[in-house]
């Protein structure tokens, strides 16, 4: 009789442990997916924000400028890089192999023909004689 109680207790404990582990695994997976969604949206927002700043300064005409503040990391602490090409802003999250792009109206961005790297921090966007210049501070 004692052996049966012990065996039943072990089986019940094993079943509860399995249910607990399955639940924990599900929660961890969902948190990971949520985190990826958040930084992916943030990466796309950064690309759009830079492209909109370039468009605004270009359309405002010669002598116009604005400052843009880019965070050092995306949401969740994800490192990223920004490259501006002709008519395209690309935000890359190298650790995850993801890239987010946003197009802009002008092709006249100084240094963008070969890919212009933009460093997170304060970025000054300036229109000089119809050409947009970006400088990081």
Image (cartoon, rainbow, N blue to C red):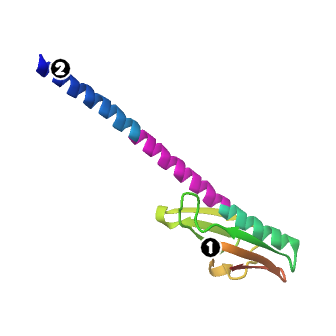
- Residue under the image location 72 percent in, 78 percent down: 134
Q: Is residue 84 visible?
A: yes
- Name the secondary structure under disc 2: helix
Label 2 or label 1, whichever comes before in sequence order = 2
Residue 96: image location, x then y, percent: 48, 61
| Residue 10 falls left or right of residue 88 | left
Q: Badge 2 local density, few (<14 within 10 Å), some, or many (20+)?
A: few
Q: Residue 72: which numbered mark, if any?
A: none
Residue furthest to the top: 1
Residue furthest to the front: 2
* Span colored in magenta: 25-45
Residue 129: image location, x then y, percent: 84, 83
Tally the numbered discs.
2
- Residue under the image location 17 percent in, 20 percent down: 5
Where is mark 1, residue-wise?
Answer: 83
Q: Main secondary structure of the magenta part?
A: helix
Give the camera-side residue of 65 and 116.
65
- Name the secondary structure under disc 1: strand
The answer to whether residue 97 is above or below residue 17 is: below
| Residue 46 falls left or right of residue 21 | right
Q: Quadrant of the N terminus?
A: top left
- Residue under the image location 66 percent in, 80 percent down: 113
Where is mark 2, residue-wise?
Answer: 5
Residue 67 belongs to the span the image colors magenta? no
| Residue 74 falls left or right of residue 123 | left
Residue 28 belongs to the span the image colors magenta? yes
Residue 123: image location, x then y, percent: 71, 75
Give the camera-side residue of 62 and 69.
69
Q: Nearer the viewer, mark 2 or mark 1?
A: 2
Give the camera-side residue of 126 and 71.
71
Q: Is residue 105 visible?
A: no
């Amino acid at each position: 009789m004692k052996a049966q109680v012990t065996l039943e207790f072990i089986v019940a404990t094993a079943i509860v442990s399995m249910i607990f582990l399955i639940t924990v695994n599900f929660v961890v997976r969902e948190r990971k997916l949520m985190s990826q969604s958040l930084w992916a949206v943030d990466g796309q927002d950064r690309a759009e924000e830079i492209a909109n700043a370039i468009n605004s300064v270009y359309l405002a005409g010669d002598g116009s400028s604005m400052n843009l503040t880019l965070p050092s990391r995306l949401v969740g602490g994800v490192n990223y890089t920004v490259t501006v090409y002709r008519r395209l802003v690309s935000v890359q999250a190298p650790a995850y192999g993801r890239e987010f792009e946003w197009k802009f109206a002008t092709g006249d961005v100084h240094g963008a023909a070969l890919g212009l790297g933009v460093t997170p921090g304060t970025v000054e966007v300036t229109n000089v004689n119809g050409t947009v210049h970006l400088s990081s501070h």
